[in-house]
Image: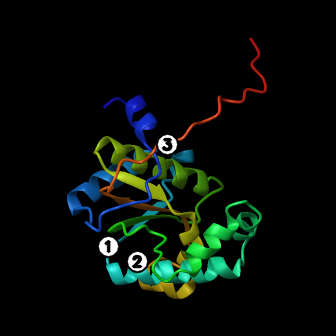
Amino acid sequence: MTAFDAIYARHATRSFTAEPIDEATIRDLLAAAVHAPTAMHLEPWAFVIVQDRALLQRISDRAKELALRAPDEPHRELARTPSAPRRAAQFADPAFNIFYDAGTLIVICGKPVGAFVAADCWLAAENVMIAATAMGLATCPIGFALAALADPAIKTELGIPADTTVFAPIIVGVPTAAAQPTTRREPLIWTWKK
């Protein structure tokens, strides 16, 4: 698979088997992550791997609780979208799991070492998702997990230092079905001076 093949084949997947990813595969994905571009070579990232089903469920439950209360801007913004009623119903459903029952969550965290930590961590996240696609695995970044993963009790349980920010929670696993491709707009080019 070429780099372009992996980029175009990567789609957010929301239906996984419960099978966790093996350690060797996770280490390969993390090796791909740390080969991402990094501003000033600071490499601010650190990783948390969660495969404990009960812990994944607790994080999901906490995330749904926080989303229903809409305490932060991303949740308030989502509340204004046409899908808000459907999303609220999902979050109110005790059976709904924000991790779509995937057996592995890779959490990319950023240490407070510079102005470009968020960008560096998201570049690492993209490498994880592209590498996973090339390996025949599926991924989905789960933004709704951010508020729960910022909860001090959950950060402590996961060993995330208080001064560290969670940037990219990504589920990785074996899809139950192929993700449906979505259309993308053509690149919007405001200026091209020759």
In the rendered structure, the answer to whether residue 41 lies left or right of residue 112 reads left
Q: Which residue appears at 54% of the width and 83% of the height?
A: 62
Whole-percent x and y of residue 45? 47, 60
Disc 2 on helix, strand or loop?
helix
Secondary structure at numbered mark 3: loop
The amino acid type, in three-letter code, at marker 1 is: Gln
* Residue placed under numbered mark 1 in the picture: 51
Tell me if I can see residue 155 in this picture: no
| Left or right: where 175 falls relative to 149 | left
Q: Position of residue 104 (x, y in %)?
A: 34, 66
Task: Tell me which label, 2 or 1, sits earlier in the chain.
Answer: 1
Residues tagged 2 and 1 counted as in contact (Cβ below 8 A):
yes
Tell which residue pokes out farthest to the top in this image.
Answer: 194
Real-space CA distance between mark 2 and mark 3, rounded to the nearest whole angstrom? 30 Å
- Residue 56 is marked as 2
Q: Tell me, what colour scheme is on the image?
A: rainbow
